Image (cartoon, grey):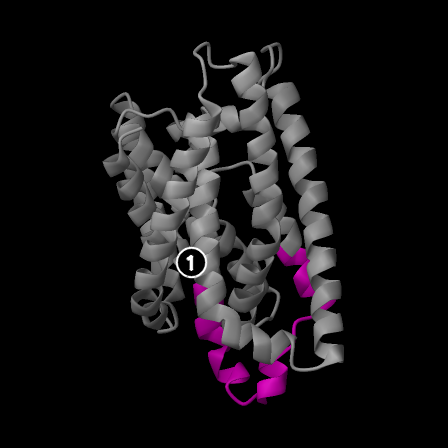
Amino acid sequence: MPILKVIILAIVQGLAELLPVSSSAHVVVAEKLMGLDPSSPQMTMLLVMLHTGTMFAVIAYFWKTWKHAYFSSRDAFRQFAVQVFWATFLTGIVGEALKKIIEKTYFRGAPKAQIEMLFSHLELIAPALLAVGVMILIAGLWERRHEDASSGKAPDDIRALTMRQAGWIGIVQGLALPFRGFSRSGSTISIGMMTGAAKETAERFSFALAVVLTPVVDVMELVRLIKASHAALTGTPINLHASLDVSMLGAVFSFIAGLLALKWLSSWLESGRWHWFGIYCMIASVVVFVLHARGF
Protein backbone atom coordinates (compact mmCIF):
# COMPACT_ATOMS: atom_id res chain seq x y z
CA MET A 1 0.00 0.00 0.00
CA PRO A 2 1.36 3.48 -0.81
CA ILE A 3 2.78 5.28 2.24
CA LEU A 4 0.67 8.36 1.47
CA LYS A 5 -2.54 6.37 1.91
CA VAL A 6 -1.29 4.99 5.23
CA ILE A 7 -0.51 8.52 6.43
CA ILE A 8 -3.97 9.76 5.37
CA LEU A 9 -5.68 6.91 7.22
CA ALA A 10 -3.51 7.52 10.30
CA ILE A 11 -4.44 11.21 10.34
CA VAL A 12 -8.15 10.37 9.99
CA GLN A 13 -7.84 7.89 12.87
CA GLY A 14 -5.90 10.33 15.06
CA LEU A 15 -8.37 13.17 14.54
CA ALA A 16 -11.45 11.01 15.15
CA GLU A 17 -10.23 8.80 18.02
CA LEU A 18 -11.05 11.06 20.95
CA LEU A 19 -14.34 12.26 19.53
CA PRO A 20 -17.39 9.99 19.89
CA VAL A 21 -17.97 9.83 16.14
CA SER A 22 -16.61 6.34 15.33
CA SER A 23 -13.03 6.67 14.13
CA SER A 24 -13.41 3.20 12.56
CA ALA A 25 -16.28 4.38 10.37
CA HIS A 26 -14.24 7.39 9.23
CA VAL A 27 -11.24 5.17 8.40
CA VAL A 28 -13.43 2.63 6.57
CA VAL A 29 -15.08 5.36 4.48
CA ALA A 30 -11.64 6.82 3.70
CA GLU A 31 -10.47 3.36 2.63
CA LYS A 32 -13.47 2.96 0.35
CA LEU A 33 -12.90 6.39 -1.21
CA MET A 34 -9.28 5.39 -1.89
CA GLY A 35 -10.35 2.13 -3.53
CA LEU A 36 -9.26 -0.17 -0.69
CA ASP A 37 -11.14 -3.17 0.73
CA PRO A 38 -11.83 -2.58 4.46
CA SER A 39 -12.83 -6.23 4.99
CA SER A 40 -9.53 -7.73 3.79
CA PRO A 41 -7.23 -9.18 6.47
CA GLN A 42 -4.53 -6.64 5.61
CA MET A 43 -6.88 -3.69 6.05
CA THR A 44 -8.54 -4.94 9.23
CA MET A 45 -5.06 -5.48 10.68
CA LEU A 46 -4.10 -1.94 9.64
CA LEU A 47 -7.28 -0.57 11.23
CA VAL A 48 -6.52 -2.33 14.51
CA MET A 49 -2.94 -1.06 14.49
CA LEU A 50 -4.16 2.47 13.83
CA HIS A 51 -6.27 2.06 16.96
CA THR A 52 -3.21 0.76 18.78
CA GLY A 53 -1.24 3.85 17.83
CA THR A 54 -3.91 6.19 19.11
CA MET A 55 -4.31 3.96 22.19
CA PHE A 56 -0.75 4.86 23.21
CA ALA A 57 -1.55 8.52 22.54
CA VAL A 58 -4.60 8.20 24.79
CA ILE A 59 -2.47 6.56 27.52
CA ALA A 60 0.00 9.46 27.36
CA TYR A 61 -2.84 11.96 27.54
CA PHE A 62 -4.96 10.35 30.27
CA TRP A 63 -2.16 8.87 32.40
CA LYS A 64 -2.14 11.61 35.06
CA THR A 65 -5.93 11.42 35.39
CA TRP A 66 -5.89 7.62 35.61
CA LYS A 67 -3.04 7.68 38.10
CA HIS A 68 -4.98 9.98 40.41
CA ALA A 69 -8.30 8.14 40.03
CA TYR A 70 -7.25 4.49 39.83
CA PHE A 71 -3.76 4.17 41.33
CA SER A 72 -3.91 6.59 44.25
CA SER A 73 -4.52 3.78 46.75
CA ARG A 74 -4.81 0.00 46.96
CA ASP A 75 -8.58 0.23 47.43
CA ALA A 76 -9.00 2.52 44.42
CA PHE A 77 -6.99 0.15 42.24
CA ARG A 78 -8.87 -2.90 43.52
CA GLN A 79 -12.22 -1.28 42.76
CA PHE A 80 -11.01 -0.24 39.30
CA ALA A 81 -9.63 -3.71 38.52
CA VAL A 82 -12.88 -5.41 39.55
CA GLN A 83 -14.96 -3.01 37.44
CA VAL A 84 -12.68 -3.44 34.42
CA PHE A 85 -12.85 -7.23 34.74
CA TRP A 86 -16.65 -7.14 35.07
CA ALA A 87 -17.12 -4.78 32.13
CA THR A 88 -14.65 -6.67 29.92
CA PHE A 89 -16.27 -10.00 30.80
CA LEU A 90 -19.67 -8.68 29.73
CA THR A 91 -18.12 -7.21 26.58
CA GLY A 92 -16.73 -10.63 25.68
CA ILE A 93 -20.04 -12.40 26.29
CA VAL A 94 -22.11 -9.92 24.29
CA GLY A 95 -19.52 -9.47 21.52
CA GLU A 96 -18.98 -13.19 21.00
CA ALA A 97 -22.71 -13.91 21.05
CA LEU A 98 -23.34 -11.21 18.43
CA LYS A 99 -20.46 -12.50 16.33
CA LYS A 100 -21.87 -16.05 16.28
CA ILE A 101 -25.42 -14.85 15.59
CA ILE A 102 -24.34 -12.65 12.67
CA GLU A 103 -22.08 -15.30 11.15
CA LYS A 104 -24.82 -17.94 11.35
CA THR A 105 -27.65 -15.71 10.06
CA TYR A 106 -26.36 -12.87 7.87
CA PHE A 107 -23.61 -15.09 6.40
CA ARG A 108 -25.56 -18.33 6.50
CA GLY A 109 -24.29 -20.69 3.83
CA ALA A 110 -21.23 -18.60 3.03
CA PRO A 111 -17.99 -20.58 3.28
CA LYS A 112 -15.47 -19.33 5.86
CA ALA A 113 -17.71 -16.41 6.82
CA GLN A 114 -16.17 -13.96 9.28
CA ILE A 115 -17.58 -10.93 11.07
CA GLU A 116 -14.88 -8.76 9.46
CA MET A 117 -16.72 -9.14 6.15
CA LEU A 118 -19.21 -6.60 7.48
CA PHE A 119 -16.59 -3.87 7.64
CA SER A 120 -16.86 -2.98 3.95
CA HIS A 121 -20.66 -2.62 4.02
CA LEU A 122 -21.48 1.10 4.05
CA GLU A 123 -25.20 0.22 4.14
CA LEU A 124 -24.56 -1.17 7.65
CA ILE A 125 -22.23 1.62 8.79
CA ALA A 126 -24.87 4.27 7.99
CA PRO A 127 -27.58 2.93 10.37
CA ALA A 128 -24.91 2.23 13.01
CA LEU A 129 -23.88 5.90 12.88
CA LEU A 130 -27.54 6.90 13.07
CA ALA A 131 -28.13 4.66 16.10
CA VAL A 132 -25.16 5.96 18.05
CA GLY A 133 -26.04 9.52 17.02
CA VAL A 134 -29.49 9.15 18.56
CA MET A 135 -27.92 7.61 21.67
CA ILE A 136 -25.42 10.46 22.06
CA LEU A 137 -28.16 13.04 21.48
CA ILE A 138 -30.33 11.49 24.20
CA ALA A 139 -27.36 11.36 26.60
CA GLY A 140 -26.49 14.98 25.85
CA LEU A 141 -30.03 16.13 26.56
CA TRP A 142 -30.01 13.98 29.71
CA GLU A 143 -26.78 15.69 30.81
CA ARG A 144 -28.18 19.17 30.27
CA ARG A 145 -31.33 18.28 32.22
CA HIS A 146 -29.39 16.88 35.18
CA GLU A 147 -26.37 19.21 35.26
CA ASP A 148 -27.91 21.40 37.91
CA ALA A 149 -28.56 18.42 40.17
CA SER A 150 -25.00 17.13 39.78
CA SER A 151 -23.26 20.50 40.15
CA GLY A 152 -23.43 20.33 43.92
CA LYS A 153 -21.85 16.91 44.25
CA ALA A 154 -18.52 16.49 45.93
CA PRO A 155 -15.52 15.48 43.80
CA ASP A 156 -15.53 12.00 45.31
CA ASP A 157 -19.12 11.54 44.17
CA ILE A 158 -18.21 12.68 40.68
CA ARG A 159 -15.35 10.18 40.48
CA ALA A 160 -17.34 7.19 41.69
CA LEU A 161 -18.52 4.54 39.25
CA THR A 162 -20.83 1.76 40.36
CA MET A 163 -20.68 -1.88 39.33
CA ARG A 164 -24.06 -1.44 37.62
CA GLN A 165 -22.73 1.44 35.53
CA ALA A 166 -19.54 -0.47 34.70
CA GLY A 167 -21.68 -3.44 33.67
CA TRP A 168 -23.82 -1.38 31.32
CA ILE A 169 -20.70 0.17 29.79
CA GLY A 170 -19.28 -3.32 29.22
CA ILE A 171 -22.51 -4.57 27.62
CA VAL A 172 -22.74 -1.63 25.23
CA GLN A 173 -19.06 -1.98 24.38
CA GLY A 174 -19.86 -5.55 23.34
CA LEU A 175 -22.62 -4.25 21.06
CA ALA A 176 -20.12 -1.90 19.41
CA LEU A 177 -17.54 -4.57 18.55
CA PRO A 178 -19.09 -6.05 15.36
CA PHE A 179 -20.43 -2.82 13.88
CA ARG A 180 -18.25 -0.14 12.35
CA GLY A 181 -20.03 3.16 12.82
CA PHE A 182 -21.51 2.35 16.24
CA SER A 183 -18.91 4.43 18.07
CA ARG A 184 -17.44 2.50 20.99
CA SER A 185 -16.53 5.61 22.96
CA GLY A 186 -19.71 7.46 22.01
CA SER A 187 -21.98 4.59 23.03
CA THR A 188 -20.14 3.64 26.23
CA ILE A 189 -19.80 7.20 27.50
CA SER A 190 -23.45 7.86 26.65
CA ILE A 191 -24.74 4.78 28.49
CA GLY A 192 -22.59 5.76 31.46
CA MET A 193 -24.19 9.20 31.47
CA MET A 194 -27.69 7.75 31.09
CA THR A 195 -27.13 5.43 34.06
CA GLY A 196 -26.15 8.35 36.27
CA ALA A 197 -22.36 8.64 35.91
CA ALA A 198 -20.72 12.00 35.30
CA LYS A 199 -19.50 12.41 31.73
CA GLU A 200 -15.88 12.79 32.89
CA THR A 201 -16.15 9.56 34.89
CA ALA A 202 -17.67 7.63 32.00
CA GLU A 203 -15.13 9.05 29.56
CA ARG A 204 -12.19 8.12 31.79
CA PHE A 205 -13.44 4.56 32.31
CA SER A 206 -14.38 4.10 28.64
CA PHE A 207 -10.90 4.93 27.40
CA ALA A 208 -9.33 2.77 30.12
CA LEU A 209 -11.44 -0.14 28.87
CA ALA A 210 -10.22 0.51 25.34
CA VAL A 211 -6.63 0.18 26.53
CA VAL A 212 -7.49 -3.23 28.03
CA LEU A 213 -9.42 -4.39 24.95
CA THR A 214 -7.06 -3.24 22.19
CA PRO A 215 -4.21 -5.75 22.78
CA VAL A 216 -6.73 -8.61 22.70
CA VAL A 217 -8.12 -7.39 19.36
CA ASP A 218 -4.55 -6.95 18.08
CA VAL A 219 -3.79 -10.60 18.76
CA MET A 220 -7.06 -11.74 17.17
CA GLU A 221 -6.39 -9.77 13.99
CA LEU A 222 -2.78 -10.97 13.85
CA VAL A 223 -4.01 -14.57 14.03
CA ARG A 224 -6.55 -13.84 11.27
CA LEU A 225 -3.85 -12.29 9.09
CA ILE A 226 -1.52 -15.25 9.62
CA LYS A 227 -4.29 -17.70 8.72
CA ALA A 228 -5.18 -15.64 5.65
CA SER A 229 -1.54 -15.56 4.54
CA HIS A 230 -1.50 -19.36 4.54
CA ALA A 231 -4.99 -19.98 3.16
CA ALA A 232 -5.20 -16.95 0.80
CA LEU A 233 -8.79 -16.23 1.84
CA THR A 234 -9.03 -13.24 -0.49
CA GLY A 235 -7.92 -15.24 -3.51
CA THR A 236 -4.62 -13.38 -3.84
CA PRO A 237 -1.30 -14.05 -2.12
CA ILE A 238 -0.73 -12.14 1.11
CA ASN A 239 2.71 -10.87 2.04
CA LEU A 240 2.59 -11.25 5.80
CA HIS A 241 5.75 -9.29 6.56
CA ALA A 242 4.79 -6.43 4.27
CA SER A 243 1.33 -6.25 5.83
CA LEU A 244 2.80 -6.14 9.32
CA ASP A 245 5.33 -3.47 8.30
CA VAL A 246 2.58 -1.29 6.84
CA SER A 247 0.43 -1.79 9.94
CA MET A 248 3.29 -0.85 12.27
CA LEU A 249 4.02 2.24 10.18
CA GLY A 250 0.34 3.18 10.39
CA ALA A 251 0.45 2.78 14.18
CA VAL A 252 3.39 5.20 14.42
CA PHE A 253 1.67 7.83 12.29
CA SER A 254 -1.65 7.43 14.16
CA PHE A 255 0.19 7.85 17.48
CA ILE A 256 1.71 11.14 16.27
CA ALA A 257 -1.59 12.33 14.80
CA GLY A 258 -3.42 11.33 17.99
CA LEU A 259 -1.03 13.26 20.23
CA LEU A 260 -1.32 16.36 18.09
CA ALA A 261 -5.11 16.14 18.01
CA LEU A 262 -5.81 15.30 21.66
CA LYS A 263 -4.92 18.67 23.16
CA TRP A 264 -6.88 20.51 20.49
CA LEU A 265 -9.94 18.30 20.72
CA SER A 266 -10.16 17.78 24.48
CA SER A 267 -11.28 21.31 25.28
CA TRP A 268 -14.10 20.95 22.75
CA LEU A 269 -15.08 17.57 24.13
CA GLU A 270 -15.37 18.98 27.64
CA SER A 271 -17.26 22.12 26.62
CA GLY A 272 -20.70 20.78 27.51
CA ARG A 273 -21.87 20.22 23.94
CA TRP A 274 -22.06 16.42 23.94
CA HIS A 275 -25.32 16.39 22.00
CA TRP A 276 -23.65 18.07 19.00
CA PHE A 277 -21.65 14.91 18.42
CA GLY A 278 -24.92 13.02 18.14
CA ILE A 279 -26.13 15.45 15.50
CA TYR A 280 -22.83 15.04 13.64
CA CYS A 281 -23.16 11.23 13.64
CA MET A 282 -26.71 11.49 12.30
CA ILE A 283 -25.54 13.77 9.47
CA ALA A 284 -22.58 11.46 8.82
CA SER A 285 -24.96 8.50 8.50
CA VAL A 286 -26.75 10.30 5.67
CA VAL A 287 -23.42 11.03 3.93
CA VAL A 288 -22.36 7.38 4.24
CA PHE A 289 -25.70 6.20 2.86
CA VAL A 290 -25.29 8.54 -0.12
CA LEU A 291 -21.81 7.16 -0.74
CA HIS A 292 -23.22 3.64 -0.65
CA ALA A 293 -25.97 4.63 -3.12
CA ARG A 294 -23.26 5.99 -5.42
CA GLY A 295 -21.51 2.63 -5.48
CA PHE A 296 -18.75 2.98 -2.91
Q: Residue at x 44, y 65 (%)?
A: 140
Give percent across and percent down for residue 200. 50, 72
Would residue 235 be visible to someone looking at this image? Answer: yes
From the viewer's perspective, is residue 78 above or below residue 192? below
Magenta-colored stretch includes residue 163? yes
The crowding category of the residue bearing disc 1, from other C-alpha atoms within 10 Å (few below 14, some 14 to 19, many at least 20), is: many
**In the image: residue 77, left or right of residue 18:** right
Counting the numbered discs, the total is: 1
**Rendering quarter of residue 153:** bottom right
The secondary structure making up most of the magenta span is helix
Give percent across and percent down for residue 7. 28, 43
Would residue 124 be visible to someone looking at this image? Answer: no
Quadrant including the N terminus:
top left
The magenta region covers 140-169
**In the image: residue 163, left or right of residue 277:** right
From the viewer's perspective, is residue 13 above or below residue 233? below
**Rendering quarter of residue 76:** bottom right
The residue nearer to you, when weighing 196 against 248, is 248
Magenta-colored stretch includes residue 232? no
The residue nearer to you, when weighing 261 against 128, is 261
Check disc 1 and give the amino acid type.
Answer: Leu
The residue nearer to you, when weighing 170 against 132, is 170
The residue nearer to you, when weighing 86 against 216, is 216
Q: Residue at x 62, y 85 (%)?
A: 156
Give percent across and percent down for residue 23. 39, 47
Quadrant including the C terminus:
top left
From the viewer's perspective, is residue 71 above or below residue 203? below
Give percent across and percent down for residue 258. 36, 57
Q: Tell me the residue that label 1 is attached to.
A: 137
Q: Secondary structure at mark 1?
A: helix
